Image (cartoon, rainbow, N blue to C red):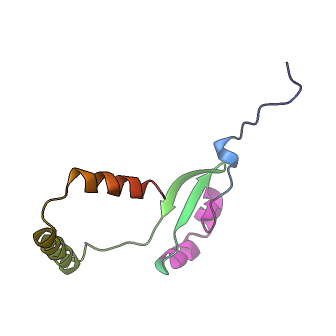
Amino acid sequence: MSDQKAAYVSPRHVPAPEGETRVGSFEAKTHFAQLMDRVEQGEEIVITRHGRAVMKLVPYRSARDKEKIREAIATMRELAKHNGPITREEILGFIKEGRRF
């Protein structure tokens, strides 16, 4: 038996990822108006309870821009005309390329 303790880290005590803003529930309740201002400017804020993330405040985004969707679909259809069907080898290549990241 070893004298060393197991290297277990509780999910509650995992530090926030780089650039993520975390705010405790009490602070969020107390400063809700200021948090709304920050979210309105585009910031996303994670609300925690006892150090564990429970929700995220994100800016409201209205219904999708239909024109952008139509353009994307038209582009995909145009590409499909020029390239024809995708082969099995191409699909496997895409998968392999995606695994690099």
Residue at 56%, 61% (x, y): give it.
Answer: 46
- Residue closest to the eye, 95 or 76: 95
Residue at 62%, 62% (x, y): give it.
Answer: 22
Q: Is residue 96 left or right of residue 17?
A: left
Q: Quadrant of the N terminus?
A: top right
Task: From the top left corner, tell me how far across and down residue 99 is, in percent.
Answer: 44, 53
**On screen, 65 above or below 88?**
below
Residue, far left: 81
- Residue closest to the eye, 79 or 18: 79
Task: From the top left corner, tell me how far across and down residue 35 is, in percent.
Answer: 56, 72
What secondary structure is the stretch in magenta mostly built from? helix
Q: Is residue 25 left or right of residue 58?
A: right
Q: Is residue 22 left or right of residue 58?
A: right
Which span is picked out in magenta? 17-39
Q: Is residue 82 magenta?
A: no
Q: Is residue 101 left or right of residue 81?
A: right
Q: Is residue 27 magenta?
A: yes
Q: Quadrant of residue 94?
A: bottom left
Residue at 30%, 74% (x, y): give it.
Answer: 62
